[in-house]
């Protein structure tokens, strides 16, 4: 009777083991389904794609801004040179006026 009892217990153990494996498999599949649904619902890929597009647009605009600032700096230098030249010319005009007045006397 001991052998009948042990074979019955072994059969019961094998049965429980099979059911446990089946339940674990179902739970793993359900977790995969939940994860897929979360990814689909969250639209994280779309949000990441949009963020990358926005970042590249900002990067391009910042490059253009840096180039424009460099150009403006060069223009400012040229204007400064022209201002200095005009200022020198004005100073020479005063000197020339004095010479013309001296010649008229």
Image (cartoon, grey):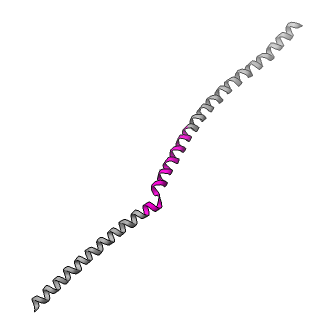
Left or right of 86 on screen, residue 45: left
Q: Position of residue 43 (x, y in %)?
A: 47, 58
Q: How many marks?
A: 0
Left or right of 21 on screen, residue 49: right
Give whichever of 86, 64 is nearer the camera.
Answer: 64
Residue 21 occupies which quadrant of the picture?
A: bottom left
Left or right of 24 on screen, residue 36: right
Give whichever of 14, 58 is nearer the camera.
Answer: 14
First to last magenta residue range: 38-63
Residue 3 occupies which quadrant of the picture?
A: bottom left
Residue farthest bottom in this picture: 1
Residue drawn at x 77%, y 19% as measured from the top left: 91
Q: Position of residue 78 (x, y in %)?
A: 65, 25
- In the displayed structure, 1 sits above or below 101; it is below
Q: Position of residue 32 (x, y in %)?
A: 36, 65
Q: Is residue 44 magenta?
A: yes
Give whichever of 85, 21 is nearer the camera.
Answer: 21
* Most common secondary structure along the magenta stretch: helix
Residue farthest right in this picture: 105
Residue drawn at x 67%, y 24% as measured from the top left: 81
Residue 6 occupies which quadrant of the picture?
A: bottom left
- In the displayed structure, 18 sits above or below 74; it is below
Looking at the rendered image, the quarter that the N terminus falls into is: bottom left
Residue drawn at x 13%, y 85% as measured from the top left: 7
Looking at the rendered image, the quarter that the C terminus falls into is: top right
Q: Position of residue 82 (x, y in %)?
A: 69, 23
Q: Is residue 49 magenta?
A: yes
- In the displayed structure, 6 sits above or below 100; it is below
Residue drawn at x 60%, y 31% as measured from the top left: 71
């Amino acid at each position: 009777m001991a052998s009948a009892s042990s074979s019955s217990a072994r059969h019961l153990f094998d049965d429980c083991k099979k059911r446990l494996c089946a339940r674990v498999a179902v739970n793993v599949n359900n977790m995969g389904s939940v994860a897929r649904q979360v990814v689909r619902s969250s639209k994280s890929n779309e949000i990441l794609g949009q963020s990358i597009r926005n970042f590249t647009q900002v990067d391009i605009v910042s490059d253009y801004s840096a180039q424009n600032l460099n150009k403006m700096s060069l223009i400012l230098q040229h204007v400064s040179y022209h201002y200095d030249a005009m200022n020198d010319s004005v100073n020479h005009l005063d000197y020339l006026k004095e010479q013309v007045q001296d010649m008229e006397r």
